[in-house]
Image (cartoon, rainbow, N blue to C red):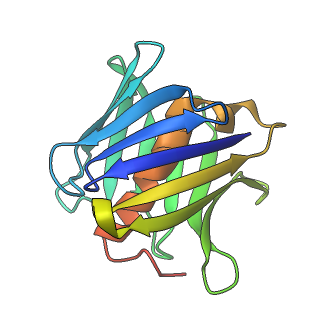
Amino acid sequence: MKYTAKGTHNRHFELFDASEASLGKLDYTSWFSIKSAIALANGKTVTIEPANIWHTSVNFTVDGEPMGTLKLNWKMHMVLSMANGQTYIFKRVGFFNSHFGLFNEAEYEMAVLDQKFQLSKLSFNYTVETDDNYKEVNDPAMVLLMIYCANFMHSMGSGGAV
């Protein structure tokens, strides 16, 4: 499945499917703040908040119920530990680290996220392509979490790290 996310001033990102239907929005309280919220088209809300004072880990909940945590590891990869026990790795990959990828525990790349900076809007736009064989990566909340991870890595200064 293919998605696009259009950003405005790196504080607001709206996710669209291939038919340009809005699936949800990721909003930050300030530029690349750790705290943010995802408002999904189905009415659910994902809240993202820091889990420690160093801001290397965040918790995310769906309508108050724990969904999982994101942690930055020593390799500068984001580790997504879901409440259902699944674990994913989000990292820069490709020739010259040209895109981001979401990998499952078997190290299979389930989703590819490419970014383009839009100078006129002072923000990144993203294109995301997911593997249709994995239902979890086609969930709009998960796609917006991947965009959050890319932004988080930029804000931590590891956007280009391997």
Could one spot residue 70 in this view of the protein?
no
- Residue 55 figure quarter: bottom left
Residue 3: x, y in percent? 62, 42
Q: Nearer the viewer, residue 80 or 20?
A: 20
Question: Residue 84, relative to residue 5: is it above or below?
Answer: above
In the foreground, 82 or 27:
27
* Near-viewer residue (117 or 152): 117
Q: Is residue 131 left or right of residue 38?
A: right
Specify whether residue 20 is in view: yes
Please provide percent x and percent y for residue 25: 38, 33
Residue 48, image x, y percentages: 31, 38
- The quadrant of the rendering that contains the C terminus is bottom right
Point out residue 71 in the picture as x, y percentages from the top left corner. 41, 56
Query: Residue placed farthest to the front in the image?
Result: 120
Q: Nearer the viewer, residue 119 or 59?
A: 119
**Residue at (29, 56) in percent of width and height:** 10
